[in-house]
């Protein structure tokens, strides 16, 4: 084994060491990213669960408001002047009011 062979063997070991180090770093980076993604997903699921009661309350309130608006619209359609004034004021404020009994449920 000559000096050229020893130098070649040393170069191969150096390259293999560097390649091994790069491979280890790459897999550590993948593991870290996976951990971060799992943690973020867990956090998002927890936030969604915290928002659920508020969403249920807002849906209930919306249904109640739709019922009131439907009643006011019916009164306005039947000729009640005060109901007509309320409907006009709501439209002026940008609140879309329509007869909810004529629309299909969602």
Image (cartoon, rainbow, N blue to C red):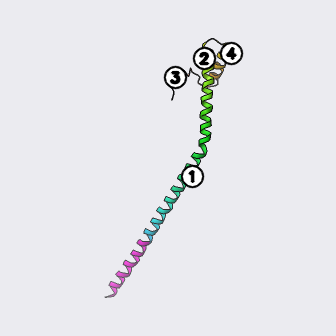
Label of residue 43 in the image: 1
Do tag 3 and tag 1 residues touch (Cβ < 8 Å)?
Answer: no
Q: Earlier in the sequence, mark 2 or mark 3?
A: 2
SS majority, magenta: helix
Residue at the spot 35% in from the left edge and 81% down from the top edge = 9
Residue at mark 1 to residue at mark 2: CA–CA distance: 46 Å
Structural crowding at the residue carrying mark 4, measured as other residues with C-alpha within 10 Å and reported as few (<14), some (14–19) or many (≥20): few
Residue ID for mark 4: 82
Q: Earlier in the sequence, mark 1 or mark 4?
A: 1
Structural crowding at the residue carrying mark 3, measured as other residues with C-alpha within 10 Å and reported as few (<14), some (14–19) or many (≥20): few
Residue at the spot 50% in from the left edge and 24% down from the top edge = 104
14 shown above or below 34: below
Residue ID for mark 3: 103
Look at the image and give the residue range highlighted in magenta.
Answer: 1-20
Residue ID for mark 2: 74
Query: What element does badge 1 sit on?
Result: helix
Q: Position of residue 95 (x, y in %)?
A: 61, 25
């Amino acid at each position: 084994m000559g000096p050229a062979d020893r130098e070649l063997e040393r170069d191969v070991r150096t390259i293999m060491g560097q390649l091994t180090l790069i491979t280890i770093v790459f897999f550590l980076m993948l593991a870290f990213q996976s951990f971060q993604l799992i943690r973020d997903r867990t956090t998002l699921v927890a936030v969604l669960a915290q928002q659920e009661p508020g969403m249920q309350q807002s849906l209930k309130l919306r249904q109640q408001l739709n019922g009131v608006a439907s009643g006011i619209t019916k009164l306005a359609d039947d000729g009640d002047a005060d109901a007509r004034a309320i409907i006009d004021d709501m439209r002026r404020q940008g609140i879309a009011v329509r007869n909810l009994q004529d629309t299909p449920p969602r």
